[in-house]
Amino acid sequence: MTVNTGSFLGRFLLPLLFLALGASGVPRAELTIEIVGGQEGAQPIAVAPFALEGGVGPAPDDLAQVIAADLARTGRFKPLPRQDMPPTPPTVEGVELRDWRVLGMNNLVAGQINRRPDGYYEVHFALFDVYSGEQLANMSLPSSAADLRHTAHRIADIVYERLTGLPGAFTSRLAYVTSEWGVDGQRVTLRVADADGHNPQTIVASKEPLLSPAWSPDGRRLAYVSFENRQTAVFIQELTTGRRELVASFPGINSAPAWSPDGRQLALTLSKDGNPEIYILDLGTRALRRLTDHPGIDTEPAWSPDGREIFFTSGRGGDPQIYRMSALGGEPTRVTFTGDYNGRPSLSPDGRSLVMVTRVNGQFRIALMDLATQSTRLLSRGGLDESPSFAPNGSMVIYATQSNGRGVLAVVSTDGKVGQRLSQDAGEVREPAWSPPPR
Amino acid sequence: MNPFPLSPVCLANFHEGARHTPEDDRVIGSLLLSLVLLLALGGCASPAKQAEVKAPGSAATTTALADRPGPPGLNDPNSPLSKRVIYFDYDSSTIKPEYVEILRAHARYVATTPKAKVMLEGHTDERGTREYNLALAEDRANAVRRFMRAEGAAAAQLGLLSFGEEKPTQPGQGEPVWALNRRVELVY
């Protein structure tokens, strides 16, 4: 789906000066992942090293390692350490399943990489049920050298889907904000990385704060808030070209962008009429429609996946609480009633639950709320946790937290059982946003 | 010459109806008060750094606010005008009694000096969500603006900016640090 970017918008588009897709001079600090929490009940699986056939040249990425790490991060799988594996079979056909049965494996992923004369690769893999001998998947994926890691994530998606019945989220991406202090002041960047923290790319760099990145439903653009002109403004930026447009720069606050599921509208917070209210901006016509009308604070809009409702944070009742209302307007109804601080809602892909920031005994934590039963479960244990965002398959939630006084990202499964921490060598990481499923 | 090149239209942003959040009564100790005083005497926000990324139609938006002459008494520790930061209770936009005289002095100065302009810059501590804090910080700046309007300052002389929790004046955590970050700075 594409948003109309006709001539009216065209004149707002401009090349971004500080676009740096892996360019020199930009630190390419990768997010390092540390898995926290138990792996109780995790299925034993082996991902044998993929043998390389044909041609000469540098060995490609260790695809088996990428796949195994993807599966391990979900907490549902416990990949066999490589040193415990029998010798690598040279081809998928050469696999001896009994070698893996004695090691207690339920499943085996085996594969080989064929280098074609034109420099491209053919990645052939099979997923075995070690006991029945059945092949649950057997396919060949063509890949450029640069896309090999991505191909490994695709294989992990397929393996995960075949074994759990749920789509994987390994080919999705993360947007996040980093902040570092140097001799010439603060350097803030908005970055996009693969879901495993690799391949970070700087989308925009500024000396002033950036916040609230929001993915377009097609995964091609990010809306975000920038203080680069001292006052907040909302921009939309195309990831591949770096072209961006200024979509909101009214007097007062311009913030909290959220795309409608069809990508045609942007909900956002503006205080141009005196205090923060939620508006809906039609990206095609530029028509602006005010949704809320209350002297209290209204902000942090989030769409329901069917596009019919807006959930938001409001201070109208005295404390910040979450409310919901029709995206067409009308009276909001209150959603949260427990505690004196519930904010920043984000809906699950199936629309049945939401994650939010809640205050419990003075600690700000991430909570998951079932909308039908109103039952709420805490997902995090920090004191300043914020900015929760669902993985596109709804199985995990990423959020910002603190570790030793430093901003890091954390991922937790929605059952709260397994988590990961993503941090950088230096500086703070915050404001994570998980991309929609790739198309 | 536009005295508020950063956000000229925000001067029209005056609003009467914004809500005060209920006061969360906290006793701030004498240590904190002395810190407050030190900070106030030490001056306030530095001018904005030029952004690396420019938005359309807003080139050269940043001028050095500090270069503009301020009111007399700005650097006289005996003048209430030298105090240009006021502090708030947690999740509150209510102006505390101890800051009334300071704000009244600034309002009178602005009211009697037609050329004077002051930017009211709202901030919060790091607790709570970033977007809600952006709104809360604006609410604080609005509370100061309402007060100064009531004391005779003209709307066109009072600019308003919200930085939310993005520009803490103190690093670290804990109530003494947070208390210093919950503030409105008056920038002439």
Image (cartoon, coloured by chain):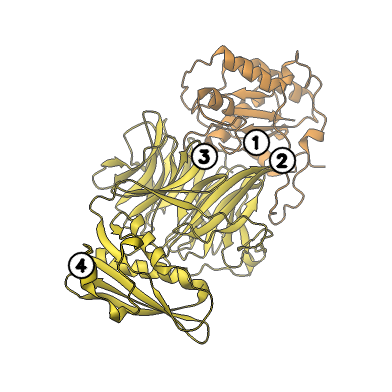
Chain colours: A yellow, B orange
Residue A281 location, x and y as percent?
A: 52, 56
Same-chain check, marks 4 and 1: no
Q: Which residue is mark 2?
A: B48
Q: Nearer the viewer, residue A32 or A87?
A: A87
Disc 3 is attached to a residue of which chain? A
Q: Which residue is mark 3?
A: A406
- Labels 2 and 1: the sequence-earlier one: 2
- Labels 4 and 3: the sequence-earlier one: 4
**Left or right of A21 on screen, residue A292:** left
Q: How many marks?
A: 4
Residue B151 location, x and y as percent?
A: 67, 21
Q: Which residue is mark 1?
A: B160
Report the amino acid beneath label 1.
Answer: Leu
Residue A417 location, x and y as percent?
A: 29, 47
Local secondary structure at mark 1: strand
Local secondary structure at mark 2: loop
Q: Nearer the viewer, residue A13 or B64?
A: B64
State the CA–CA distance, disc 2 to disc 1: 15 Å
Q: Which residue is mark 4?
A: A101
